[in-house]
């Protein structure tokens, strides 16, 4: 049994320089835990409400003092001094206090900061590493699967104005014996891409997730650059290193059509699927996240039916880590994978529930950062504990991105033989070599 003696929320800055919430939770036994919340730029319509002050005189309206007030005036009085055993009891209490389907009363940012800090303080109190503390919630113990890192080395869309329409071009080092090998390969490819861009006179600017953000004339040019970078770094695309995409299609879906402004093209859902199919044949693509709009269920079904046997079709905006939306997706065979971002749903308990539900239904799951991040490494531990074998935390560049990859390296060193890097069957994802 544990008892919270103090909850201290603070308005701090995220990686974009926007306010976010940091919560410190102190237990009566003196243990201290922390929780940070990240923030999206390319947010899904069905995410929980991120409460902002909308006071134009402070931080351009982006202050979070109202959410912090909810922590101090509503959440704290209900949980400080109350005996509990499990962070899920605190989450349940917050869900009750909020009483809305999308956390619009308290703010998903307020509830998640408290939720993570309470889980953290319990792990600290038990003198356990966070990944080991969380593992039993996923039915895991003792031996672990480390996630394959999905490095977003070329940024576009909402994360890099003036770059590609597609939001994320990721490289995934798959055939490496351990996490450190994959981490090194991803980093070398990242630097090879930097050199290629410099040689071609592009400014070496990076987007919100640390990937390069060159002003290219087409999305396919980004694919060609990735292929070159993999080769220049000394690796073979389609053999050791693969490509993952997050077009974030809801961002370019207007008036029922998909509009790629960089290349002046417009697609119907069917045409966009055919476009992806050509790329899947040509390039070693292992996953496409949000290839279609968040409400375009019918085309999601077709995309998954056509490429889902060997390409992961991952729902991010489509599901927003929401179990009920995932249930709909499963019933309709809309995708074969889900992206997990705890702040889309607002409590750690609900994120865990969605992951376990995905697992029970043979839906793969990838743990993800947000484009507005912070120095916290919680999602690295979550990815190891949940064992889904996939994490995306941006490029191997900028501390808010590398902190997660570095934490997995630390966990790998700590666990030795008890940890194995995830594997993935890529025999059908070779592209046209
Ligand atoms: P976001 O983008 O954090 O800006 O929503 C990440 C993603 O779409 O995966
Ligand atoms: Zn996404």
Image: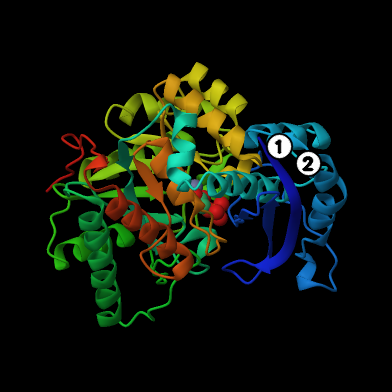
**Farthest top residue in view:** 331
| Residue in view at x 55 percent, y 63 percent | 374
Report x, y in % for residue 48.
69, 42
Is residue 111 shown left or right of residue 165? right
Residue 387 or residue 368, whichever sits in front: 387
386 horizontally vs 38: left or right: left
**Above or below for 89 versus 366:** above
Residue 377 as seen in the image, left or right of residue 23: left
- Side of 164 where 256 appears, left or right: right
Residue 172 in the image, given as x and y percentages of width and height: 28, 51
426 w.r.t. 154: above or below: above
Q: CA distance from mark 2 to mark 1?
A: 7 Å
**Quarter-of-image position of residue 402:** bottom left
Q: Tell whether label 1 touches label 2 (CB within 8 Å).
A: yes
Q: Secondary structure at mark 2?
A: helix
Question: Which of the 4 image quarters holds residue 388?
Answer: top left
Q: Residue at x 17, y 49 (%)?
A: 176
Which of the two residues, 213 or 141, is positioned nearer the viewer here?
Answer: 141
> In percent of the image, x 60 and y 34: which residue is there?
349
Residue 288 on image: x %, y %: 38, 42
Q: Which mark is residue 233?
A: none
Taking the image as drawn, is residue 394 in sight?
yes
Ligand 1: does it lie within 8 Å of the C-beta at label 2? no
Does 154 appear above or below 334?
below
The spot of residue 127 in percent (x, y) is: 49, 48
- First in sequence: mark 2 or mark 1? 2
Give the quarter of the figure containing the N terminus: top right
Q: On the image, numbered disc 2 is attached to which residue?
A: 79
Report the residue marked by disc 1.
Answer: 90
């Amino acid at each position: 049994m544990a008892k919270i003696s103090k909850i201290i929320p603070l308005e701090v800055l995220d990686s974009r320089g926007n306010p976010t919430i940091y919560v410190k939770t102190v237990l009566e036994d003196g243990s201290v835990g922390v929780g940070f919340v990240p923030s999206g730029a390319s947010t899904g319509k069905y995410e929980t409400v991120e409460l902002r002050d909308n006071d134009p005189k402070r931080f351009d309206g982006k202050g979070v003092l109202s959410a912090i007030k909810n922590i101090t005036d509503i959440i704290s009085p209900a949980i400080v001094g109350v005996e509990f055993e499990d962070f899920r009891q605190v989450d349940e209490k917050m869900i009750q206090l909020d009483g809305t389907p999308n956390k619009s009363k308290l703010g998903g940012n307020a509830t998640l900061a408290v939720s993570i800090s309470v889980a953290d303080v319990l792990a600290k109190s038990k003198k356990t590493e966070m990944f080991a503390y969380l593992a039993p919630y996923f039915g895991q113990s003792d031996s672990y699967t480390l996630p394959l890192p999905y490095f977003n080395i070329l940024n576009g869309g909402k994360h890099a104005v003036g770059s590609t329409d597609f939001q994320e071009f990721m490289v995934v080092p798959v055939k490496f014996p351990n996490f450190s090998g994959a981490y090194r390969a991803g980093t070398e490819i990242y630097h090879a891409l930097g050199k290629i861009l410099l040689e071609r006179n592009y400014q070496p600017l990076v987007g919100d997730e640390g990937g390069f953000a060159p002003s290219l004339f087409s999305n396919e040019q980004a694919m060609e650059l990735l292929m070159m970078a993999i080769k220049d770094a000394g690796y073979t695309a389609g053999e050791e290193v693969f490509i993952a995409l997050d077009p974030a299609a809801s961002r370019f879906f207007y008036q029922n059509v998909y509009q790629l402004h960089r290349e002046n093209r417009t697609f119907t859902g069917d045409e966009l699927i055919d476009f992806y199919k050509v790329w899947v044949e040509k390039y070693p693509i292992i996953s496409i996240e949000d290839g279609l709009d968040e409400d375009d269920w019918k085309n999601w079904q077709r995309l998954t039916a056509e490429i889902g046997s060997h390409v992961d079709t991952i729902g991010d905006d489509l599901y927003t880590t929401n179990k009920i939306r995932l249930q709909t997706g499963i019933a309709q065979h809309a995708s074969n994978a889900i992206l997990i971002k705890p702040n889309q749903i607002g409590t750690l308990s609900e994120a865990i529930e969605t992951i376990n539900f995905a697992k029970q239904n043979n839906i793969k799951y990838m743990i993800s950062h947000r484009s507005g991040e912070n120095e916290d490494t919680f999602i690295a531990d979550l990815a190891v504990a949940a064992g889904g074998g996939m994490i995306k935390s941006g490029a191997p560049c900028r501390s808010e991105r590398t902190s997660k990859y570095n934490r997995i390296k630390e966990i790998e060193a700590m666990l030795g033989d008890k940890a194995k890097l995830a594997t993935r069957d890529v025999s059908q994802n070779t592209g046209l070599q």
